[in-house]
Amino acid sequence: MPRGSKSAYTSKQKRKAHHIEESARKRGASAARAAQIGWATVNKEEGGGKKSGSGRGKPPTRSSSRRGGKRSHGGRSSSRRSRS
């Protein structure tokens, strides 16, 4: 299977990547960059495509989805608060 092939992904994972891609396009990313963001998010949350074998299943993390496409500001809020 070639590296760029998406045949190892489930239909749910493909659908999820497509929705994330649409969201990235609305935020102003190019088509190629939006596709990268979509598949990278699916890979991060679910560990790539479907894998066979007993005990291979892990619950997916939702950390990227919870961010909602927002970039973190590296503690900007806490640095503006007073130290007292």
Image: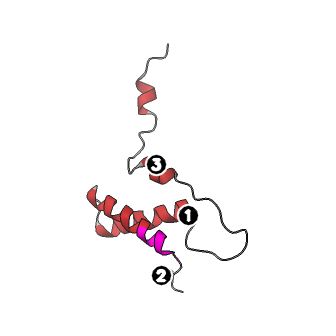
First of labels 1, 2 by sequence position: 2
First of labels 3, 1 by sequence position: 1
Q: CA distance from mark 3 to mark 2?
A: 27 Å
What residue is shown with label 2?
5
What residue is shown with label 1?
46
What color scheme is it? secondary structure
Span colored in magenta: 9-15
Q: CA distance from mark 3 to mark 1?
A: 14 Å
Tag on residue 77?
none
User: Where 56 sits versus 45, above or below?
Assistant: below
Circle 3: residue type? Arg
Check if residue 72 falls in the magenta segment.
no
Could you tell me residue 20's position as x and y percent?
38, 62
User: Where 70 sits versus 53, above or below?
Assistant: above
Q: Main secondary structure of the magenta part?
A: helix
Tag on residue 66?
3
Circle 2: residue type? Ser
Could you tell me residue 13's position as x and y percent?
48, 69
Label 1 element class: helix
Circle 1: residue type? Glu
